[in-house]
Amino acid sequence: MILSSRTSRVLLCGAVAVGVIMAPAVATAGREQAGPRGQAGEVATPALRGPIPGTVPGDPKAADVRDTYPWMSTNVDLAAAGYVEQEFHVSGRADAYSTAGDPVGSDVPYQTRVIVRRPVHPAKFNGTVLAEWQNVTAGYDLDAMWSHQQIMREGYAWVGVSAQRVGVDHLRGWSPARYGDLDVTGGGRFMADELSYDVYAQVAKALRGGSGEVRPLGRLPARTILAVGASQSAGRMTIYYDNVLPKTEAVFDGFANIVGSAPSRKGAEPVFQVLSETDVRNPVRRPDDDRFVRWEVAGAAHSGWNGQEYRRPILERDLGAAPSFNCDQPPWSRVPLHHVIAAAYGHLTRWSGSGARPPAAPPLELNPDGTKPRDELGIARGGIRLSQVDVPTALNTGDNSGESFCRLFGTHIPFDRSRLDRLYPSHGGYVAAVATTDGRNVRAGYLLPGDALRNLRDAVASDIGKP
């Protein structure tokens, strides 16, 4: 699960309890009418409003600044990369399903929101949309799969979908003026996210385009739409794939289930599961086949350094403070799981299009009791091994313990100078080892060249092996 601590829940409850300054209802731009329901099982095309007007976060002219920008609006300079962030409200009538896939309601009205980060010009767009089922375990929408360096460098469009009640309820409390009309419960009739599967699918249907005046992707032609989700969201996507999708129209081209469960059913759409070391606890694994591939990454954590550092200033802005944790070991592995996920997106796009199956990867080694054998440095054996693991400057693992969700953060313990000097007598030898390992991973398909170059620059800039 991509999680926050009890601290964040307290902050959340406080924000909702105190309330926000009411402002005039936010005006919206163009409107598109929802299409007819069509035949049984057909996914409806929802209505869209937007882009929802808003200024940059922190505009001193706003009566209540939270009404002027989307929840967790990115602090990345999108314009410098030729990207734009826009928010849309999505409404329609959805069918309701139990977790077993049984229909429990039909034509239930809903309204939610999507947040879009995309290239401005079609020439920048690679044709693939990453439609993220936003994680709500912390009590609010979390853009867990927004890895901006890789997504913008490779030219993806990213769309965050608010499909679940917890996330939408938080939005309504955080900014009633902006989100007060949102509801994914059918007015309280469906409180266990029964509508979420069809809502998620309807958003994908809208991303396919159409003749309406409101286009969430602008002029970008979406050739491939991938369903992506981390942890709790991967679990929801698993239910959707196994139990709901067989009864409905297929609207996604492939599924990326990250640090969470994956479907057991073999369907028409390919499924790519990527797990951190934290997530691998059972030697019984679904074997790879022509519709399913699983990767396991040594040293990586379920919720690691990259995501935590990206979200910290945004949570401080939007909640008043970021959560802190008191773990038994220094938290947050710095093995960049997001580098491997970025490589997986490219494979999944090609797999869903041309049928080119991604490369297999060695599994992490496991003892019969589910623990992981480790080398003399304490690093797990097997799995995909990035240069941060095979040319280590710190002990990075997927394990930790302590309060709250510490067990999901992994460990990062830098090596002292004497150990570094023994491992890397020369700076050139260290840089060469990083380049060799990353080159091997690029050739194997586990790492993109852009991330290998970034690692190389970091190695060159370091003082490892210098007198």
Image (tube, grey):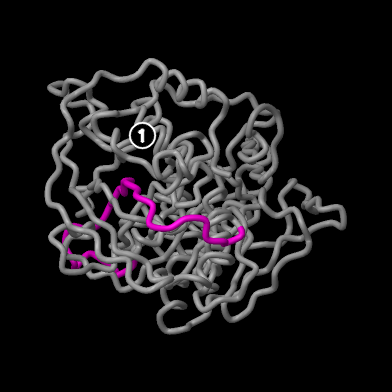
In x, y percent, where is residue 435?
A: 51, 61
Residue occupying the point 31% across, 40% down: 74
Decide: is 10 above or below 239: above
* Residue 432 in view of the camera: no
Provide the residue designation for mark 1.
171
Q: Quadrant of the N terminus?
A: top right
Residue occupying the point 60% across, 44% down: 393
Q: Which residues are magenta?
A: 100-128
Decide: is 257 above or below 408: below
What residue occupies the far top of the structure in this picture? 18
In x, y percent, where is residue 398?
A: 66, 46
Tag 1's secondary structure?
Answer: helix
Asked where in the image residue 154 lies, by quadrant, the reply is bottom left
* Residue 366 in view of the camera: yes
Q: Residues within 10 Å of mark 1 (few under 14, many from 20)?
A: many
What residue occupies the far right of the structure in this picture? 368
Q: Is residue 261 magenta?
A: no
Q: Name the residue type under label 1.
A: Leu
Instruction: Using the image as rendered, state which of residue 55 and residue 213 is in the foreground.
Output: 213
Residue occupying the point 61% across, 65% down: 263
